[in-house]
Amino acid sequence: MSAARDQILGSVRKALGRDGPVDAGTAERLRAGIAAHARNIVPKRTDLDRPALLDLFQTMAQNVHATVARVARMDDVPAAVGDYLKGQNLPAQIVMAPDPTLDGADWGSQKLLEIRRGVPVESDPVSVTSAAAAVAETGTLIMNSGPDHPSTLNFLPETHIVVLPASRVAKSYEDIWDQLRGQMAERGGLLPRTVNMVTGPSRSGDIEQTLLLGAHGPRRLHIVLVGDGEET
């Protein structure tokens, strides 16, 4: 063991009030606690029926400077994206995730929309992705990296549009971790390489506590919430 590692572990043990490594009994209790995946406290405000939960998600997302449009079906998504781009005076050029979820929309219905599937480059103004899940508690989007969702789509373009099926809106982070652990079994015990939790567009108040959007990523985050059989 290196001297630096000894020093780091020694500092951790000192903070925990320990003189050395834990005994076998304590180690077993710690392992059991990790394996149990006990759920933490869930805010009471998420104890809602589905329509109210979707309303909560929209309110929380808008509170952190995201914008939200609600449509009934995937067929309505391309027009909603086109309307947003026109409303923001943005070019009708998007780089889109190679995500099967997005294939459910007739993108050809928007004749002026130029679409490229894949990873973004610096000149791409707008990205379109789906999201693996969302958290009504905080208006947060859960983005799992993978072949169908390159993580750079979340951060490189200045405008990020997320097509979110309403069925993927969960109450709390505890529900999200339960879902991820369930997916681990399907993936042979593996999590996605990256799980990005995105709450609103990128922003910073580091300079004189003045809010600046687009500090470290997109300056605009627009969510198209799709009913997909649920009431929106």
Image: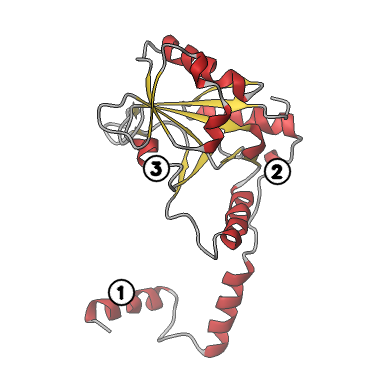
Q: Amino acid at mark 2?
A: Lys
Q: Residue at x 67, y 29 (%)?
A: 228
Label 1 packing within 10 angstroms: few (<14), some (14-19), many (20+): few
Residue 8 badge: 1
Mark 3 residue type = Pro
Q: Circle 3: is it few (<14), some (14-19), or many (20+) Cα within 10 Å?
A: many
Residue 152 at x, y = what percent?
35, 40
Q: CA distance from mark 3 to mark 2?
A: 35 Å
User: Which quadrant would the C terminus be assigned to in this image?
Assistant: top right
The reply to whether the C-beta atoms of the residues labelled 3 and 2 are less than 8 Å apart is no
Foreground residue, 41 or 202?
202
SS for dot 2: helix
Q: Disc 2 designates what residue?
A: 44
Q: CA distance from mark 1 to mark 2?
A: 39 Å
Q: Is residue 60 visible?
A: no
Q: Residues within 10 Å of mark 2 (few under 14, many from 20)?
A: few
In percent of width and height, residue 174 lies at 62, 52
